[in-house]
Image (cartoon, rainbow, N blue to C red):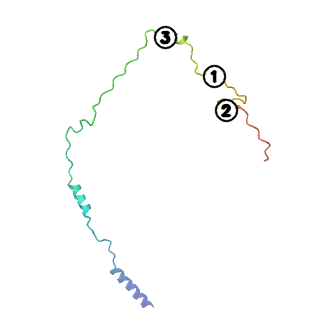
Amino acid sequence: MSSFVRLATTTARISSRSRLFSTSTAVRKDFVQDLYVKELKGYKAPPQAKDAHVGVVKDFVAPAEPKIPVLPADLASELAAYDAAEPVSDAVVNTTTSEEGPTGAEAFLSFLESDPPKAADAHH
């Protein structure tokens, strides 16, 4: 039995040495890629003119200084006229009344102000 094992191991060693795997694959030339790379390497950008930025970049113009506000000469009389004027009320008076109670915001506020309903005796 030992001679059989010896023979098997020797055969395995010899076969593993003779069957080396090649990691390189068959190299195929890609003509399109080679042509593209060659054209990229040979490309030279045209030189730009020294005044190429003219018309593209705007010249800086500082904004005009704001004017100082001038108070009217008769400020006291204008303030007195303002105080004497009656304020204008834009409130709309609701002429319709409902018998059911307040609606809208008033109903919501009265709901918030009311006490919460007491729960029936809960069994613990």
| Earlier sequence position, callout 3 versus callout 1 | 3
Image check: 88 left or right of 41? Answer: right
Q: Quick one: 85 or 90, which is closer to the camera?
A: 90
Q: Are marks 3 and 1 in contact (CB under 8 Å)?
A: no
Residue at image x 36%, y 82%? 15
* Residue that carries the numbered disc 1 in the rendered image: 93
Q: Position of residue 13 (x, y in %)?
A: 37, 82
* Distance from Cα at disc 3 to Cα at disc 1: 32 Å
| Amino acid on which disc 1 is placed | Val
Q: Amino acid at mark 3?
A: Glu
Disc 3 or 2, which lies upstream in sequence?
3
Question: Splitting the image into 4 quarters, where does residue 109 fall?
Answer: top right
Q: Quadrant where the N terminus lies?
A: bottom left
> Can you tell which mark lies on residue 78?
3
Rendered residue at 25%/62% (across/down): 32
* Residue 78, image x, y percentages: 49, 11
User: Where is residue 7, by image quadrant?
Assistant: bottom left
Circle 2 residue = 108
Q: CA distance from mark 3 to mark 2?
A: 44 Å
The alpha-carbon separation of the residues under discs 2 and 1 comes to: 19 Å
Q: Nearer the viewer, residue 104 or 113?
A: 104
- Within the image, what quadrant is residue 57 found in? top left
Q: Amino acid at mark 2?
A: Phe
Of residues 123 and 81, the one nearer the viewer is: 81
- Secondary structure under tag 2 reads helix
Disc marking residue 3: none
- Secondary structure at badge 1 equals loop
Q: Kindly identify the residue that appears in the image at 24 percent across and 58 percent down.
A: 37
Q: Residues within 10 Å of mark 2 (few under 14, many from 20)?
A: few
